[in-house]
């Protein structure tokens, strides 16, 4: 006899500060940072659940949440006639006048959302990763194995393991040890160069989740899922791993299978953005069978035109969003966001321009991220002189220059 369709509640954790993404997170939450021109980072996890038809979703927000709340409220609307919803939920401070102290505490402070919905399972997913996934397959595997929690995992280079929760599991998939951001993470069996990292995506049995996030007489007061909840359920023998590489997404090509990027730093964000614009991209925005949804602004089509003096525009290996105009400028390996203007003689290479940016005549940009509404004066060069850039602008470890939102740039001092 076939199993009935489970009642699934989705909790998206979107309350982190995003300090490593500064200055892009100076006045917005990390999940609200634009990505790929037309999207926000949070759109990728929400699109996965929308495509899977898991349509009861709460988004837990906290720091600098206004733009995130606004984006979710304007963009993510499901039919309430069928009981579906995407709801941003700010910190309710149910334990007193303080913020969430971690991911487990965030869930504990919002247990009313779970008890009101009475789901069979709860999907707890992060809001700041770029990937495609069919969460139904993970839920099905979780139900087949009758465990307290299933943790999605992916191999990463061993030297990166200290940034993640690292899993040791047996051949059956039962988690034996969970190491949260260990300075010396264990390598995978048979592969000393990689370790098995948690993706920050979990499927919980509802009662098990309620029990484990609830403090117990001062002896157990969980703050974080990775630091407290998973080690506790692992010690009980009730945690299992889900191999993300087995997830089969409709329309996904072999090159993209297993693609997952944590965009928590400027360099990681930049590298993931560049993945979109290769002739055969590592992550394909054009999969119509599993689309990425977002707010589509009422803007005219992108336009390529000759400049005022007749210069011919040239755009190669780039994304051009709605409302953007390249008027005699040259753009290569770049992402040009909505409502961006690039004037004659400008040379934009390996760069990301957020909505509303204005690029003056003769500007040269290389490996730069220009946040919203910045006007770059004529003939200014950014990204070509590392010493000069570091003296004037925020610069990442790998030399990516970041100009913050609404920043007033002075003309070229030379």
Image (cartoon, helix red, strand yellow):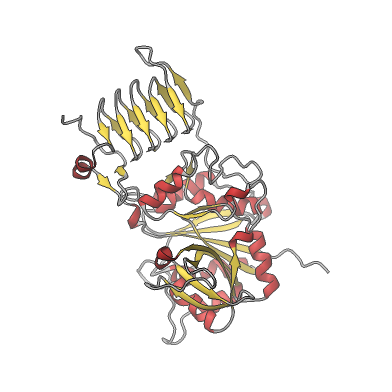
- Residue at horizontal 40%, vertical 70%? 181
Is residue 46 found left or right of 359 in the rendered image? right
Instruction: Check the image and name the residue furthest to the top.
Output: 309
Q: Quadrant of residue 96?
A: bottom left
* Residue at position x 77%, y 67% in the image: 3
Most foreground residue, 77 or 193: 193
Residue 192 appears at what percent x and percent y?
48, 69
69 or 396, which lies in front?
Answer: 396
- On the image, the x and y values in percent for residue 195 come to 48, 68
Q: Decide if residue 33 is in sight here.
A: no
Give the percent coordinates (x, y) of residue 394: 26, 46
Q: Quadrant of the N terminus?
A: bottom right
Question: Which image quarter: residue 169?
Answer: bottom right
**Front in this rendered view, residue 224 or 385:** 385
Vertical order, 210 against 390 (above or below): below
Q: Tell me residue 177's x, y (percent).
A: 50, 78
Image: 224 above or below 57: below
User: Could you tell whether 225 is left or right of 98 in the image?
Assistant: right
**Does residue 3 appear left or right of residue 187 in this picture?**
right
Residue 57 at least partly seen: yes
Q: Residue at x 42, y 47 (%)?
A: 271
Q: Quadrant of the C terminus?
A: top left
Question: What residue appears at the point 64 percent right and 64 percent down from the top-left corner?
Answer: 138
Please identify the residue farthest to the left as the structure is shown: 414
Tell me how many marks there are: 0
Taking the image as shown, residue 148 lies to the left or right of residue 311, namely right
Taking depth in this image into account, of 366 and 80 the one nearest to the observer is 366
């Amino acid at each position: 006899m076939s199993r009935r369709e489970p009642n699934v509640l989705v909790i998206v954790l979107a309350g982190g500060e995003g300090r490593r993404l500064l200055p892009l997170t100076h006045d917005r939450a990390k999940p609200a940072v634009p990505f790929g021109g037309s999207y926000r980072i949070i759109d990728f996890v929400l699109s996965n659940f929308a495509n899977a038809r898991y349509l009861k979703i709460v988004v837990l927000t906290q720091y600098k949440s206004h733009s995130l709340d606004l984006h979710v409220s304007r963009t993510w609307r499901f039919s309430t006639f069928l009981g579906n919803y995407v709801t941003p939920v700010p910190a309710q401070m149910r334990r007193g006048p303080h913020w969430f102290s971690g991911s487990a505490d965030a869930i504990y402070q919002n247990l009313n959302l779970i008890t009101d919905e009475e789901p069979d399972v709860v999907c707890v997913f992060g809001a700041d990763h770029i990937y495609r996934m069919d969460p139904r397959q993970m839920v099905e595997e979780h139900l087949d194995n009758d465990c307290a929690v299933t943790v999605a995992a992916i191999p990463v280079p061993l030297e990166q393991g200290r940034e993640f929760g690292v899993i040791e599991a047996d051949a059956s998939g039962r988690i034996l040890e969970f190491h949260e951001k260990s300075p010396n993470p264990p390598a995978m069996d048979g592969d000393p160069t990689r370790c098995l990292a948690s993706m920050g995506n979990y499927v919980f049995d509802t009662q098990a989740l309620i029990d484990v996030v609830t403090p117990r007489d001062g002896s157990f007061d969980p703050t974080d899922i990775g630091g407290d909840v998973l080690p506790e359920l692992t010690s009980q023998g009730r945690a299992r791993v889900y191999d993300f590489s087995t997830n089969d997404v409709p329309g996904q090509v072999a090159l993209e299978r297993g693609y997952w990027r944590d965009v928590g730093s400027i360099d990681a964000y930049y590298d993931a953005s560049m993945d979109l614009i290769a002739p055969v991209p590592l992550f394909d925005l054009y999969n119509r069978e599993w689309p990425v949804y977002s707010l589509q602004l009422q803007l005219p089509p992108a336009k390529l035109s000759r400049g005022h003096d007749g210069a011919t525009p040239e755009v190669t290996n780039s994304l051009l969003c709605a409302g953007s105009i390249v008027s005699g400028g040259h753009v290569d390996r770049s992402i040009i966001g909505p409502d961006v203007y690039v004037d004659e003689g400008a040379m934009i290479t390996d760069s990301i321009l957020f909505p509303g940016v204005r690029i003056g005549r003769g500007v040269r940009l290389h490996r730069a991220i220009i946040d919203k509404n910045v006007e770059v004066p004529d003939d200014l060069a950014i990204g070509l002189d590392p010493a000069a850039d570091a003296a004037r602008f925020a610069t990442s470890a790998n030399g990516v220059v970041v100009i913050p939102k609404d920043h007033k740039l002075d003309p070229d001092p030379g």
